[in-house]
Amino acid sequence: MNPKATAGQGNTPQMRQLRLQETIYPFGVGAIVDIKSESFIGMDTATWNEKTCEPLSCPPLERALGVLQLRRPPTAGEFSRNPSFALPYRRFPKWRFCQDCTLMSDRVHHKNGASTNNCSRCSGPMVPMRFIAVCKAGGHIQDVDWRRWSHFQSSNDEQHQCRDFEHLELRTTPGAGEGLRSLRVICRSCDSARNLGSLGRETSLAEEGYKCWGRQPWEPQDTTKECTSELRVVQRGSTSVYQAETASAIDIPEVESATQALRNSVLQNDMFKGVFGQQQGPLFDLAVPLIATQTGAPEHMVRRLLTTDPASDTSHLQSTLHSGEWAAFDRVLAGDADVTNPDFDVHPSDYPREPGVLPALAGLVSDVGLVRRLREVRALRGFRRYEQEDFTRVDLGSIDGLKWYPAIEQFGEGIFLRFDEEALRTWEAEPSVQRRTRHWIDRGAKLANRRVVISDLHPRYVLLHTLAHLLMRRLEFQSGYSASSLSERIYASNDGPDPQGGLLIYTSSGDAQGTLGGLVRLGEARYFSRLLLGAVEDADRCSNNPVCAESRGQGMNSLNLAACHACSLTSETSCERNNIYLDRKLLVGDESVPGFFRTVLMDARASI
């Protein structure tokens, strides 16, 4: 059963087909999806038929998101034509051009009562225009007004006063090369013409006085809202057009970690409630140590909770979910069978008890858990466009308040690694490790886009994140799963009474591949020690060395050090941090910084 999408304009909706998980990411609310030669955009949840969206239970995620319910997108049979069981999508961009006769049009041609993707003049195939307009910071998106744009540089009054938009054509200028200047929009009514060269500048629309309409393409035309953000011209397929804001949780038995209990006691403190939301100052500085004394929480935790909004802070949301999951894994590996259930089936591996495991390796990775089955629930909260800071909610901010999020469930398997806490703390305390970590802290302080920054970054996060990437690259060839179907969860925190130091690699495409056993098998000692040693070996070399190894900042916003596509980066869908906060040197070290696995690497090479 796959979700259907109602697409097009007119009284007779046309059905298209998407995979279930695609309706959350990457083609959820507000996203542009290309189906064959057509282009559509997902409409907000207020337009969905809520009666066909079945409830989906995941108490930890519901509680963390602060909603009453999660609901699964509606699914329909392969030959269903009932729009009640379909998700609404609107054709976008409206403007298209004919590949045969070059006619441009923002109208849909109908034949026998149904909309078609054919030209009204020659019945040739219509193709969506490549360029669209995106609001710089407000999250809005709209068509380029091609009629106005094509007449903007008119040479006479007749062209300037032309209001004809039914005779525009997109033509190629012979001998003008293959760039945007070779494409021209021509008005056959007044002979006005303009090439697309200026669209190479993203500020071209703002320079010519175009204003944001303050709405999404599917909203009524009379709902124009005031928006002062500038328009930017972008290509329809650009990654800046849409970034989904999702949250996921592993469905575990109700387990509250000691850190979460401590955090909750701070949030319920009367003095905390009185100071929260106020500007920092003498009263703020006085309240922090008093709250810490009353609750037993460290002052840095109190200060962070006072200065962040739990409802909108993604890092806080992720930390809350990971805290409960870590507590569940910790209790399972300690032998507590009450924590498991049919959808959270975890058993300790025979690592490191089996002979043949290097003592140095057993001293760093203390436990391995075989996750034979897990259930992950992923919810779509909203989306961002371009440089938007606060995300646009999936219901576009309804005044009634959002009571549910669209979500999907996926079943899979995985390997969980728990590291020795004393070894992590000893390594983190090294001054050179602390100095190297300053790179990310200093870079984060300079970024305007604060949502990509980890505010309480510890060296262990970069270490575990990089190792997870190297393991996923190895597992792709040994587990039977593709790279894009593997995902990571990093548990890295030294705050509170139960510090976290571990990682989970699991399958995330359960609707297609399910639990095949190939990943769990590799967590057994006879396979795992070789797998982990191979990942550490991979950390010591890269085909882009010495450029990669000596990098002082690469990747998005220079938030990677010794990490590039040739050695450490994985599929975007696999990484929880969009392929940033990576550094191979923290694993293997060099003359300037001690690597966490340096002794393991030396012992392994000495035994050959």
Image (spheres, grey):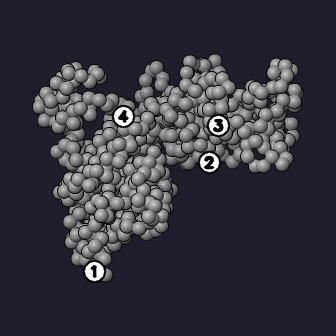
- For this orientation, the residue located farthest to the bottom is 608
Q: Position of residue 382 (x, y in %)?
A: 47, 34
The answer to which of marks 1 and 4 sits earlier in the sequence is: 4
- How far separated are the C-alphas under marks 3 and 2? 44 Å
Q: Nearer the viewer, residue 561 or 375?
A: 561
From the image, tell me which residue sits under label 1: 607
The answer to which of marks 3 and 1 sits earlier in the sequence is: 3
Q: Residue at x 16, y 36 (%)?
A: 297
Quarter of the figure with residue 596: bottom left
Q: Are marks 4 and 3 in contact (CB under 8 Å)?
A: no
Q: Position of residue 322 (x, y in %)?
A: 30, 45
For badge 3, the amino acid type reads Arg
From the image, tell me which residue sits under label 2: 78
Q: Which mark is residue 313?
A: 4
Q: Residues within 10 Å of mark 3 (few under 14, many from 20)?
A: few
Image quarter hosting the C terminus? bottom left
Q: Nearer the viewer, residue 188 or 487?
A: 188
For badge 4, the amino acid type reads Asp
Residue 559 in sight: yes
Quarter of the figure with residue 201: top right
Q: Residues within 10 Å of mark 2 (few under 14, many from 20)?
A: few
Q: Secondary structure at mark 1?
A: loop
- How far separated are the C-alphas under marks 3 and 1? 59 Å
Q: Are marks 1 and 4 in contact (CB under 8 Å)?
A: no
Quarter of the figure with residue 288: top left
From the image, tell me which residue sits under label 3: 201
Q: Position of residue 475 (x, y in %)?
A: 42, 65
Q: Residues within 10 Å of mark 4 (few under 14, many from 20)?
A: few
Question: Marks 3 and 1: which is nearer the front?
Answer: 3
Q: Secondary structure at mark 3?
A: loop
Q: Secondary structure at mark 4?
A: loop
- How far separated are the C-alphas under marks 1 and 2? 58 Å
